[in-house]
Image (cartoon, grey):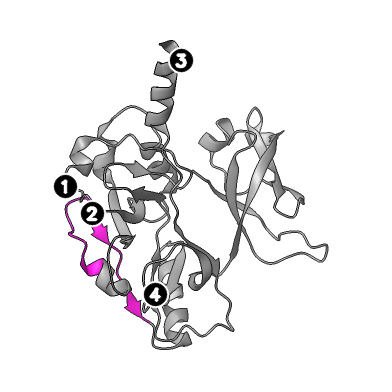
Amino acid sequence: MRYLLVILLFSSLFAQKPELLLLNKYSKDMNVTSWYMSEKLDGVRAFWDGEKLISRSGKTFSTPIFFTKDFPKHKLDGELWTKRSDFSNVSSIVNKKKLHSGWKNLTYNIFEVPDAKGNLLERLKSVKTTKYIKTIKQIKIIDKKHLDNFLKSIEKKGGEGVVVRDGSLNYYTGRDDKALKVKSYIDEECKVIGHNDGQGKYEGMVGSLSCRMKNMQVIKIGSGLNNYQRENPPKIGAIITFKYYGLTSKGNPRFPVFLHERY
């Protein structure tokens, strides 16, 4: 009986990892004229399977009834979000196991409708917006300058970047060059393998994280961590996202900055 209860508890916390649309990186030699662009929200990815919200890794979010009571029975894919530059707050809200009222500050911003037919705009038109369900505005790209100006306007407001997609395609999952993220910096993921002690004003806290990149290179990331994160750093083995601005002469990421932990 005890074993059965453990299985039931585990299954309530984790669902099957959803198959998702994933983004490749944009490069300036790519022609995306007549595609659609939208702001890339710096929130937490969430997949609605018709009954519950699931994270990218397959974790079931503890969502209050008031938040999901008007959600449809069909699937949705989007971002849990509050405002720009507020990822830490969003993460704190959605990753609490107990139900709480903090969800009233969130909206679920839709960029895909897996069960819908037609092109991107047709799929998004099928979404019934509510107090908590919104759709992310899609803008047709006139030319490269139009995209560049849109990116600058988003980053000037504190936004993370832009998503560009070939809006003529039917829904699909996986990663290819028909859905791209556009940013003025480069971002990567790495695994935390160590915590390094801080000095000076960071004495008694974490000064930097030692991380192993996909190419097995080990780097240290200290910039971007706030005091809470220095006192409660990502655990060893956690996957984090960081940004950097090109490579040094030795091939190391230049000016690496912590962004957030992947959930």
Pointer 3 residue: 3
The nearer-to-camera label among 2 and 3 is 3
Callouts 2 and 4 close, C-beta under 8 Å: no
Element at badge 3?
helix
Residue 124 at x, y percent in the picture? 26, 67
Q: Which mark is residue 133?
A: 2
Q: Are marks 2 and 1 in contact (CB under 8 Å)?
A: yes
Residue 232 shows in this picture: yes
Q: CA distance from mark 4 to mark 3?
A: 49 Å
How far is the residue under mark 2 from the one under mark 4? Answer: 20 Å
Residue ID at (44%, 56%): 20
Left or right, 233 with reference to 174: right
- As shown in the figure, which amino acid type bears the numbered disc 4? Met
Which quadrant of the figure has residue 93?
Answer: top left
Give the quarter of the image for residue 199: top right
Residue 19 appears left or right of 216:
left
Residue indicated by mark 4 = 37
Mark 1 or 3, nearer chain start: 3
Residue located beneath label 1 in the image: 70
- Residue visible at 27% across and 42% down? 51
Q: SS at mark 2?
A: strand
Q: Earlier in the sequence, mark 2 or mark 1?
A: 1
Residue 59 versus residue 17: which sits nearer the camera? 17
Query: Number of labelled discs?
Result: 4
Q: Position of residue 106 (x, y in %)?
A: 29, 47
User: Distance from label 2 to label 1 (Cα)?
Assistant: 9 Å
Q: Which one is earlier in the sequence, the residue at label 2 or at label 3? A: 3
